[in-house]
Image (spheres, rainbow, N blue to C red):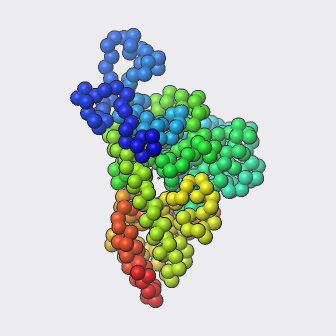
Amino acid sequence: MKKETEAIHTRFQSSDAYGALSMPVYHTAAYEFEDAATMADAFCGRIDAPDYSRVTNPTVIYFENKVKALTGAADAIAFSSGMAAICGTLMCLAGAGKNIVTSRHMFGNTFMLITDTLGRFGVEARLCDLTDPEEVAAATDGNTCCIYTEIITNPQMEVVDLQKLSETAHSRNIPLVADTTMIPFTEFSAKELGVDIEVVSSTKYISGGATSIGGLAIDYGWKSFSDLMRKEMLMNLGAYMTPHAAYMQALGLETLSVRYARQSATALEIAQRLEGHPAIRKVNCIGLKDNPFHELASRQFGPTCGAMITIDLADRDACFSFINRLKLIRRATNLFDNKSLAIHPASTIFGNFTPEERAEMDILDTTIRLSIGLEAPEDILEDILHALQHTDNHTTALI
Ligand SMILES: *Cc1c(COP(=O)(O)O)cnc(C)c1O
């Protein structure tokens, strides 16, 4: 079956009392047992039966099974947010005295998790340029618990060579962990590129329409990893996905490939139309042929480029005035909603970092991040061009 078919026809583990065609939402904290022995078997993992919804729930398992079918993973574990999935994964792999080899080009909260939060527990963050295999190799040692990367950094849009990174990792018996939120797993196989553990914010593409917060840790064969994740992290962190979120996100998965195809095509079209606009210093979109990461990205992720693009204007004031003049595109964080969204990362997501820290992370005051939605491309473009006109009196519209 093709992935879009698989995404729709995942079967329930056992039949529903009423033969519901849609997976019911099992809003229950606990489950009842026939007798004490069955209860003991369920609690000790000897039989596959839910016991308590902090660690297992039929609706969440249904969502996890859809993800397993789509990725071919050994296991997929759903968390209450992308950050919870990342935190659970890193807490599972790391410990005092261990180090994580990663980059400064990183989602702000992940960066703070690794450097500050895990740092307080004696985990060392080794920050290097993940696009430079020699630097990565030099940063690893016997205490490296993983190499952690994002497949397309946000908002810098740097693309790492996953195969090269995995060769470095595997030659040292270190797992490669990749945050793949930027390109959905229906489009490419992280496993084939050598990723051992994939983490995803399912809040973004998967939820669809930004209905709910969620995260996934997807295990490609580090079986002891997913066992520990379920036995220790789900139990002790208490950040399993809720059944309601799982219901919405399973529904989101069913339409993911259709939404993604449309959104990424529109994003590329808009990037192409904005290139050369006099008010814009730079359009950053990996789908553009002259983008330095275009070839590597198409080799790894296929012909699509994702639905996030950035534009750089003259300065922060120009960015604020552009954002204030948008009429259709919403002023909001989040990515890959059905609605187009705009944000100024430097003053929001990275607003609590010092200017020096932002400079080190290549977060510029001139950058606006756009997440392109499902609206008609010409309406989105018209909104952008209109907002740009007022940032520079000499601008002439392109349409
Ligand atoms: C949004 C995001 C996260 C965090 O996910 P939440 O679901 O918001 O907790 C992590 N990584 C990337 C790349 C993201 O875009």
Q: Is residue 17 above or below residue 352?
A: above
Number of marks present in the image shown: 0
Q: Is residue 377 above or below residue 56?
A: below
What x and y, as percent, mark residue 304?
Answer: 51, 59
Q: Is residue 327 above or below residue 209?
A: below
Is residue 107 left or right of 1 when viewed as pictured? right
What x and y, as percent, mark residue 165?
Answer: 68, 48
Q: Is residue 155 visible?
A: yes
Asked where in the image residue 16 lies, by quadrant, the reply is: top left
Q: Is residue 368 visible?
A: no
Residue 13 or residue 205, whichever sits in front? 13
Identity of the residue drawn at 37% across and 42% down: 8
Is residue 391 left or right of 211 when viewed as pictured? right
Is residue 206 left or right of 22 when viewed as pictured? right
What x and y, as percent, mark residue 328?
Answer: 33, 70
Asked where in the image residue 353 lies, by quadrant, the reply is: bottom right
* Image quadrant in which the N terminus is located: top left
